[in-house]
Amino acid sequence: MPPQDDVDKIMAIMVAAFDPAYGEAWTRGQIESALVIGHCQYWLIAPDGTVPDEGDEAAGFALLRRTLDEAELLLFAVSPQWRRCGLGARLLERMMGDTKVEGTTRVMLEMRQGNPAQYLYQSYGFAAVGIRPKYYRGIDGERIDAVTFTCPLG
Ligand SMILES: CC(C)(COP(=O)(O)OP(=O)(O)OC[C@H]1O[C@@H](n2cnc3c(N)ncnc32)[C@H](O)[C@@H]1OP(=O)(O)O)[C@@H](O)C(=O)NCCC(=O)NCCS
């Protein structure tokens, strides 16, 4: 099992960071399953940009699944009070650097169309390569397209 303190940190950010209107937040059970049987990795970042120690506050996290030489960024979030301080960029850099060292050649992700996170992703070399029509469903039943982005780790 992953350290429960880390799962607590991820869940606290999850609840704060994802707009409930889009139903994008995962449950604790989904996170634990992803880490235990889904072979996912996670990264945490503290408000000062370091890796938080046990019991310290975390400001953001990333969750990634690797398959052979590809990886999928499944979740990526910074708590609202710590946004636009460069923490998302730092977390993305750390995740991409570590993943490249482990032999991954490409990172992909799926994002709700119109999510401003695209500006951050694009500035790190992610390019939109496809649309999945009506892939997400908001809690009001509205269907929203997903955009698939990929980024080579050259
Ligand atoms: C996406 C997210 C992780 C960005 O985290 P962050 O810590 O605010 O990002 P940074 O401060 O590192 O931003 C770096 C740059 O990315 C761009 N950027 C980030 N958020 C942006 C926004 N909302 N609008 C426009 N540009 C943005 C800007 O160029 C920014 O630089 P600047 O602040 O100097 O202009 C955060 O907004 C978040 O948690 N959103 C909700 C969860 C989510 O939608 N995650 C993505 C799922 S695919």
Image (cartoon, grey):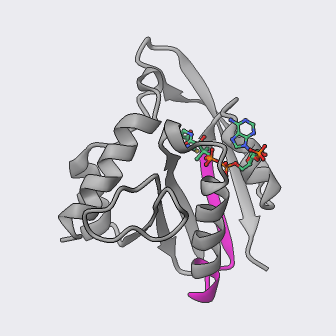
Q: Point out residue 59 in the picture as x, y percentages from the top left corner.
A: 46, 52
Q: For the image shown, how many numbered marks are present on the structure?
A: 0
Q: In this view, does 42 lie to the left or right of 136?
A: left
Q: Can residue 33 be seen in this view?
A: no
Q: Is residue 82 left or right of residue 105?
A: left
Q: In which quarter of the image is ligand 1?
A: top right
Q: Which residue is drawn at 21% across and 50% down?
A: 29
Q: In which quarter of the image is the N terminus?
A: bottom left
Q: In which quarter of the image is the C terminus?
A: bottom right
The image quadrant that residue 15 belongs to is: top left
The image quadrant that residue 3 belongs to is: bottom left
On screen, residue 117 above or below 90: above
Identify the residue at the far front of this view: 48
Is residue 3 inside the magenta stretch?
no
Q: Give the range drawn in magenta.
A: 99-110
Is residue 100 inside the magenta stretch?
yes
Q: Point out residue 94 in the picture as x, y percentages from the top left corner.
A: 60, 72
Q: Residue at x 68, y 79 (%)?
A: 105
Q: Is residue 23 left or right of residue 100?
A: left
